[in-house]
Amino acid sequence: MSRTVYLNGDYLPEAEAKVSIFDRGFVMADGVYEVTSVLGGKLLDFAGHLARLTRSLNELGMDNPLPDEEWLAIHRKLVEVNAIDEGLVYLQVTRGNPGDRDFAFPPKDTPQTIVLFTQSKPGLAANPSAQTGIRVISVPDLRWSRRDIKTVQLLYPSLAKMEAKAKGADDAWLVEDGFVTEGTSNNTYIVKGGTIVTRQLSTDILHGITRAALLRFASEAQMKVEERPFTIEEAQEADEAFFTSASAFVLPVVEIDGKPVAGGKPGPVTTRLREIYLEESLKAAI
């Protein structure tokens, strides 16, 4: 059964959705995106994703092409027509089609390209990796310096993830100046002496929506949080390690560069944080 997707105001079968070869998202990676998880047919952390979308667009000098209520209506319709119970809604906005390739931005009134599609992911909340944990390797962080903008420039994270898989691991943690920045598509954490440690917000990392929610829930649960960089060596010696993302929620990391973390099993803090995140996010889902 073909998915229904959204393209520039129209709901279309995916095979009929076409974008120009001159679109700047295609030739310049000149676009931003968001991914919102769906559980029980409802959207998680939707307001946060829209706020970050607007911020990313502003940082690139682009307007937000739709009001919040229209974004919500499109998401809900795609979830409904594609019968998504557990899965994702992907949203992308580019600077549009200037009619030819040019490094200079097109005129301000050039129509932006708006694309949304769904991905069905049955069992998203019951990910077996939450019970077993995942293994990561460390790689140098060679991305551009504006990682706080959620652009479609994802080649280096993809290469890093493939390097991890080639080495028998699940993902990679990126390292710059001796400290972990983030994962290929997630924010990173360790737990030491009951304290949750994660890198502070800056242009060095993506301002994760799941990160923000998790830290709020942790604070409400009277857990101690310290925002600072940490090294791979510190992570290997930590009591626990984990990461967060919109589609993985909270997942334990049980091995880093071949060295088990705390015996190679998910820890109690990570397990509890995943439970809290899913409980509270489902309550607030729309």
Image: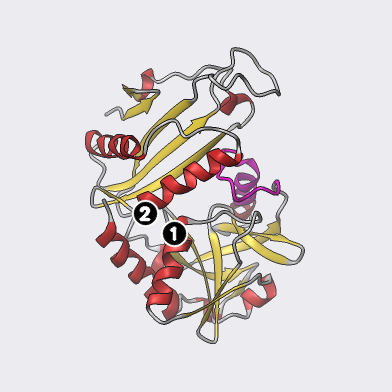
How far apart in space, not on screen, are marks 2 and 1 (Cα)? 8 Å
Secondary structure of the residue carrying tag 1 is helix
Q: Residues within 10 Å of mark 1 (few under 14, many from 20)?
A: many
Q: Residues within 10 Å of mark 2 (few under 14, many from 20)?
A: many
Instruction: Tell me the quarter of the picture where residue 203 sits.
Output: bottom right
The vertical placement of 125 against 88, above or below, is: below
Q: Is residue 125 left or right of residue 212?
A: left
**Image location (x, y in percent) of residue 135:** 55, 64
Q: Is residue 150 magenta?
A: yes
**Image location (x, y in percent) of residue 63:** 51, 32
**Which of marks 1 and 2 precedes in the sequence?**
2
Q: Is residue 141 left or right of residue 5?
A: right
Magenta stretch? Answer: 144-162
**Image location (x, y in percent) of residue 20:** 52, 17
In the picture of the structure, the residue carrying the numbered disc 1 is 210
Which mark, residue 45? Answer: 2
The single residue placed furthest to the bottom in the displayed view is: 193
Badge 2 amino acid: Asp
Secondary structure of the residue carrying tag 2 is loop
